[in-house]
Image: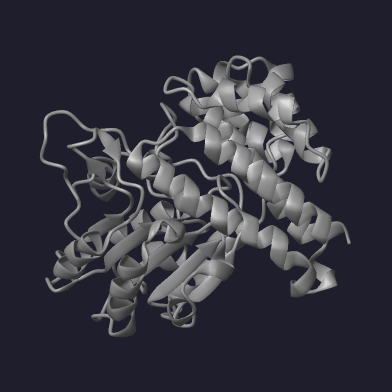
């Protein structure tokens, strides 16, 4: 897992300067899911592949790393410390925790969008070559006779070749191996891969839970003004990173503008949309652009869940918008294209879908 360089490049799965999930020992949400994993491990029923699903930013990766730490720190499920454990907590000073925090544990492989030294940006996808590196690790014996673990963060970032390569590994897993696949949209995971995994679905966090989590992140987040934090938490659609974005600068004002434009669909004030595109598309406005895309995804997810009982035919146009937008966003990022046409296209497609959705 170690990068082997003096300077660590930016990590695609880390939110700005907040602690990475592998560095996070506090876990104050999803107690039922944590208990499910703990009970399965000590009963010898831990699946070899688990999809940890749910909206972005709700603690899926934190739970995956928490389970990983516990398995590496306690490789014998029959040990007294495991049988008497109430949670998956492992102290930060434990050797396994220190190795994981440093990305230096030989039995753990992290599949994520890697850093591209040529472009000085993260790749837009998890590639087949990345998965092949994981396959090489799984061909080796585990260091202490324990688990070899692959964390995929996230399934949505796997390109088709990468997903198929991972499927082959999951289909014939070596003994004492574990695949923890983080999925923001578990229903869109490759069906043949999904069928070989147990699904553990997590719910969005409440505003109070987000506030409690932010308090554990350290400065500057834990020093946020209480009123601003409460407002951000309530508008974050259950996501901690969304709340952190809203805490920065003019983000609350920008979020209000975006949500107003979405609420007016299928009507579109194109002057406002052009202004929004100019505001967030600049090279120095990455945080604003990311927040806009997250807000749009949250809006679509909320609409789809609200209307879930009306059947797939009614929901399909809106779901297809995001699939198309996600692919266009990856292409825009990969080719370093102007984001303005993408933003205008997204709102045009949303307006068309909203008309069909409301019919």
Looking at the image, which residue sits at the far right? 359
Q: Please give left or right for residue 212 compared with residue 234 in the image.
A: left
Along the line of sight, which residue is nearer the eye, 140 or 299?
299
Q: Position of residue 300 (x, y in %)?
A: 70, 51
Residue at the image position 21 percent from the left and 32 percent from the top: 8
Quarter occupied by residue 239 = top right
Q: Position of residue 229 (x, y in %)?
A: 68, 23
Q: How many marks?
A: 0
Residue 315 visible from this viewpoint: yes
Q: Position of residue 209 (x, y in %)?
A: 67, 40
Residue at the image position 83 percent from the left and 70 percent from the top: 309
* 172 is higher (above) or lower (below) than 29: below
Q: Position of residue 102 (x, y in %)?
A: 23, 40
Q: Please give left or right for residue 27 compared with residue 142 in the image.
A: right
Residue at the image position 49 percent from the left and 22 percent from the top: 285
* 146 is higher (above) or lower (below) than 233: below
Quarter occupied by residue 344 = top right
Residue 205 visible from this viewpoint: no
* 303 is higher (above) or lower (below) than 166: above
Along the line of sight, which residue is nearer the eye, 2 or 73?
2
Residue at the image position 20 percent from the left and 52 percent from the top: 105
The colouring scheme, among rainbow, by chain, secondary structure or one colour, is one colour
Quarter occupied by residue 3 = top left
The quarter of the rendered structure image containing the C terminus is: bottom right
């Amino acid at each position: 897992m170690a990068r082997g360089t003096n300077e660590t490049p930016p990590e695609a799965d880390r939110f700005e300067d907040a602690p990475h999930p592998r560095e996070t020992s506090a876990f104050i949400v999803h107690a039922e899911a944590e208990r499910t994993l703990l009970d399965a491990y000590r009963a010898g029923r831990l699946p070899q592949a688990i999809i940890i699903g749910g909206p972005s930013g709700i603690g899926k990766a934190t739970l995956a790393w928490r389970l990983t730490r516990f398995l590496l720190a306690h490789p014998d499920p029959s040990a007294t410390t495991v049988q008497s454990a109430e949670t998956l907590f492992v102290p930060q000073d434990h050797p396994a925790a220190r190795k994981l925090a440093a990305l230096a544990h030989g039995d753990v492989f992290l599949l994520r969008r890697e850093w591209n030294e040529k472009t000085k940006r993260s790749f837009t996808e998890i590639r087949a070559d990345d998965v092949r590196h994981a396959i090489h690790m799984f061909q080796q014996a585990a260091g202490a006779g324990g688990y070899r673990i692959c964390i995929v963060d996230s399934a949505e970032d796997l390109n088709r070749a990468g997903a198929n390569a991972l499927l082959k590994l999951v289909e014939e897993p070596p003994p004492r191996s574990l695949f923890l696949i983080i999925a923001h949209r578990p229903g869109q995971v490759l069906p043949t891969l999904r069928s070989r995994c147990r699904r553990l679905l997590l719910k969005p966090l409440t505003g109070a839970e987000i506030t409690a989590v932010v308090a554990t992140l350290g400065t500057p987040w834990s020093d946020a003004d209480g009123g601003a934090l409460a407002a951000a938490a309530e508008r974050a659609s259950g996501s901690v990173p969304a709340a952190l974005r809203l805490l920065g600068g003019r983000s609350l004002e920008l979020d209000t503008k975006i949500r107003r434009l979405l609420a007016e669909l299928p009507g579109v004030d194109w002057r406002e949309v052009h202004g929004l595109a100019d505001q967030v598309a600049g090279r120095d406005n990455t945080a604003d652009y990311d927040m806009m895309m997250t807000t749009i995804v949250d809006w679509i997810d909320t609409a789809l869940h609200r209307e879930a009982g009306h059947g797939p035919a009614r929901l399909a146009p809106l779901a297809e918008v995001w699939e198309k937008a996600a692919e266009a966003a990856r292409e825009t990022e990969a080719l370093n294209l102007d984001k303005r046409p993408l933003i205008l296209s997204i709102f045009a497609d949303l307006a068309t879908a909203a008309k069909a959705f409301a019919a």
